[in-house]
Image (spheres, grey):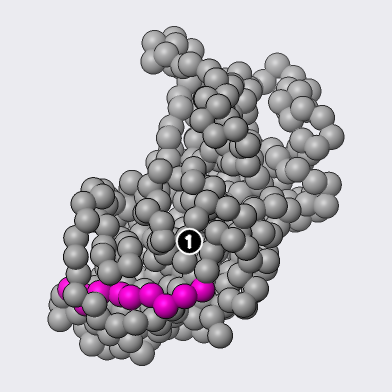
Amino acid sequence: MVLKIIHQQSGLCSNNEVVQYPIKMKTEAIVLVKKAKPAQAFERREWSIPTINADQVIIESEAFGLNYADVMASQGLYREAPPMPSVIGYEVVGKVVEVGSNIDASWLGKRVLAFCRFGGYSKHVITENFAFVALDNIPAGEALALCTQGVTAYYMSQYLAPVRKNERVLIHAAAGGVGSLLIQLCKMNGAEVYAKIGSSKKAEFVKKLGADHVIDYSKSDYAEQISKILGVERLDVSFNPVAGDTFKKDFKLLGSGGRLMLFGGSQMSGGKYGIFSTLNFLRKMGLILPIGLMMRSKNTLGINMLKIADNKPMIMFDCLNAVFQLYRQGKLKPEVGGSFPVTDFTKAFESLESGKSVGKIGVYWD
């Protein structure tokens, strides 16, 4: 599912080796040009894409999705991001306009949802033969929600370490793109869901999705709220994209056999003191020794979907198809949190960055 990362007239492979590609065509993109606030960090400008190989396609994008990793990249905190100026973004909805010689020509003109390894903010996107699925008339916003965020939620809760019936599950950022899908997937498995939110305005939303307990951390310490509900019991799973001091809190809340799924570090964003903010973030997480995990029978699982995409791309493809099957069966309902024209890209990005949005945010080309 791996898009070649375009850096001006070059591509950066996943091993960061710079490779020159023949230029195929000129297009346009929202380009990350510097570490700054969204209005200064991005520019809409002309962009170049290379000639595709036999196993790739070119997609003319209708819309692209935003993910919190994009916020980290704009702040210079995402080490996997290509060097600036670059085009980030992981997913697009659009029409196949060119296919490689190894790909069935019947795909030409078809509307698809596609993964990409960066490059999603471009009007034309190159991706691999196993990285897209047919969409028909599915709304673009819902399709985008099922891509990176849907596959992440499915991989963690159904594939890597499946949630079991009656397990107690904590979901951080429960009203967000991944969190809202995790609630549905965990309830589908029969779990008891603790949905952590940062505003009372989101409470009704997560309840409608099936959350059993709403934990509003803006009111008081979330760990204390959960401990009062649990009593002598403990959590079985935590889905944590925050890290920082929440890591130690969650680890303490877990019982025997508990799993802490760490899939982000949003508490690092917004740091004002550079390396000192990073060091403080790491200090808050503390030190976990492997022997301690064994003695307590607790588990910490790190999830980086970009690495899974690089090294085991068919897992991504299988998860994407499974998510779409659940969607078509009416068992999974993605939430569209905002649909913005590309001219309002800054507003879209600021909405995501603020932490006040719910569900998936999509940006639509002219």
Which residues are drawn in magenta? 44-53
Query: Split into 4 quadrants, where in the image is the N terminus?
Result: bottom left
Q: Residue at x 43, y 35 (%)?
A: 302
Q: Amino acid at mark 1?
A: Leu
Q: Is residue 257 left or right of residue 348?
A: left
Mark 1: which secondary structure? strand
| Position of 87 relative to 343 (above/below) | above
Could you say where residue 311 lies in the image, as x and y percent from the top left? 26, 48
Asked whether residue 210 appears in the rendered view, the answer is no
Mark 1: give few (<14), some (14-19) or many (20+) Cα within 10 Å: many
Nearer the observer, 129 or 349: 349
Q: Residue at x 77, y 35 (%)?
A: 217
Could you say where residue 45 lies in the image, as x and y percent from the top left? 47, 75
Magenta span: helix, strand or loop, mainly?
A: strand
* Quadrant position of residue 208: bottom right
Asked whether residue 139 appears in the rendered view, the answer is yes
